[in-house]
Image (cartoon, rainbow, N blue to C red):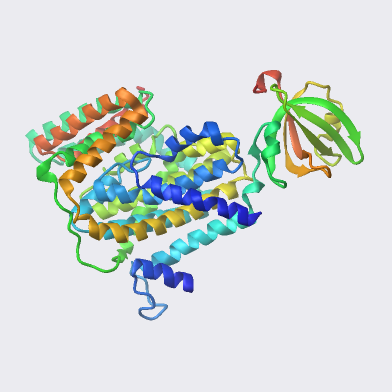
Amino acid sequence: MLCIDFALFIPVYLFGIFASLLPGLHPNSIGALLNPWLSSWPDWPFMLVALLGIRIALQFLPSILVGTPAGETGLGMLPGARMMKEGRGLEALMICACAVVIATLAALALSPFLLPLFPSLFMIIKPWVGYLLVIASAVLICSEGEVKKAGYALLIFALAAALGLLTLNLTLLDPLFCLFVGFFTLPMLFSPHRLVKPRQKKTDSFPSVSLSLLPFIALGLCLGGLSDLLPGLSTPSQVAAIATLIVPLSAPAHYLALVASIEASHTAFAFSSAASAGVARVGVVAMAEQMTPISMQSLPVYLGTYALSVGIGAAALLILGRWLIPRWSKLDWPALSRLIGLYLILIILLNDGLLGLIVLACATLLGLLTLRLSVRRTHVMGALIGPAILNAFGLI
Amino acid sequence: MPCLDMMSMAFRGPIGKGPPFRAVRALSPVHLSFLILLLILIGLSLLILFPLSSAYSLTSPSGVWLMRDGQWAQVQGSLDRSTAKSGGLSFRLCEAAGGCVSIYAPEQMEGFSELASLRNGQPMRVWGEVSSAQYGARFIRAHRFELLANSELNP
């Protein structure tokens, strides 16, 4: 029986590795597509979780290589692509793998102790969340230095907030993917002067990662847990966007560790949250819950599947990355950029139709505007922070 | 150790450098290999202790025929034709589409006395283990059950 169980995972893992390398092909989409045929297969919910676990780790590879949005936060691409441009692609991969593995191990170990603490912690913070966000956003905008640039930053922040508010209320399959591809990926791909061939530092091994990253992984662990349990606060993407106010994007290694940790722990805590509170805030976990309820009895099976898959995903991330990254600079970048751009537009059209394309176009214009005005691209995080502020004051 | 060697070679990490208990100042590829291996071992251990079949799979009465022996299932339907058996009660649970599955409820099961007094057509949900009778027919050995209102029963 056990052999049958493990044999089932092998083709799923191979498919998962392939699917995780394609941006936009999230297990949510795979689940929605295949559920009508496979939902009566008793092991299907666990196979979906296996796909999710693989993706949690492996999604950072395309994100680092081509700057596409990754996962629930969608934000790993910012520091990842930046490190790749600086020739630190292998270091970025090592940071992602460390953060994902450590955060998953910690989340598995801490779930029973942390889950009861989060609600009381939230009750203390909740009345102050709105004010804290307004002050932090003001600091972010003023940090541009010049008055004129701060004015531009405020304009970008307000426009992004309006776009975010509209987009998050649309019935799109993956609204964040549309937004972030527009804000970051397409402007980068279609600005020829920004296309730098990311020649990597000559090294034959992965560099070691400083232990100074551990506090950021720990912070990500807490934020991942908070985003699971506190619907009033926000989604992981909003939490990660808000975290840019604490951990600046100018320290890409720290921010990458934080985002990877949020991704991994948010999903690990989602299982415990579903089992204890009946709330599943991750799409695949909610889908699996509908087929095989997540109870205290089935929780170890889900967590075991998730842990195994994240481990295999992390190993695949390092092995594939080790092979791909040194070869990446030898590719024909202008042609590759056009192909990736076309693929992203097509996947958005397939996922979210014309509405998705309209959101993508608006987000791309805003992304290009930040480049034109020479202000930091972090200000487009207003798309997530703006709705979080309104939510905190009970205005939406 | 061979596993570690293989992973370390894949990552080209410097395995075996330095004394084994020096203070860790940075996470090297070897440390990461250990952590990945630990995560995989935890996952495998959980799956060995709690195999996939130990979770209740949501299925329909006719879907039970596709399940393996020993797998845990959750089915819902309407009660039909209960018969007293030695040490318990046997009844059929039928879905609106007509598919039925036999359920065996042992006397020790919680709420057994209530089950024995139920009338035909009572909607209910049953959790239990899929088993095969001597002649190959599938049935569920019930662990517990829950009575439902008519409106709660999905077609």
* Residue B114: % across, % down: 83, 29
Residue ranking furthest to the bottom: B19
* Residue A75: % across, % down: 30, 43
A378 horizontally vs B64: left or right? left
Q: Is residue B105 visible?
A: yes
Residue at screen point 26% across, 69% down? A204
Q: Quadrant of residue A289?
A: top right
Residue A145 versus residue A373: which sits nearer the camera? A373
Q: Quadrant of the N terminus of chain A?
A: bottom right
* Image: A394 above or below A297: above
Residue at screen point 36% across, 50% down? A260
Q: Is residue A278 visible?
A: no
Q: Quadrant of residue B34?
A: bottom left
Q: Quadrant of residue B33?
A: bottom left
Residue ranking furthest to the right: B86
Q: Quadrant of the C terminus of chain A?
A: top left
B62 horizontally vs A27: left or right? right
* Residue A68: % across, % down: 28, 43
A273 horizontally vs A242: left or right? right
Residue at screen point 61% across, 53% down? A4
Residue at screen point 35% across, 22% down? A395
A192 horizontally vs A126: left or right? left
* Image: B115 above or below A303: above
* Residue A393: % across, % down: 35, 26
Residue A278 versus residue B37: which sits nearer the camera? B37
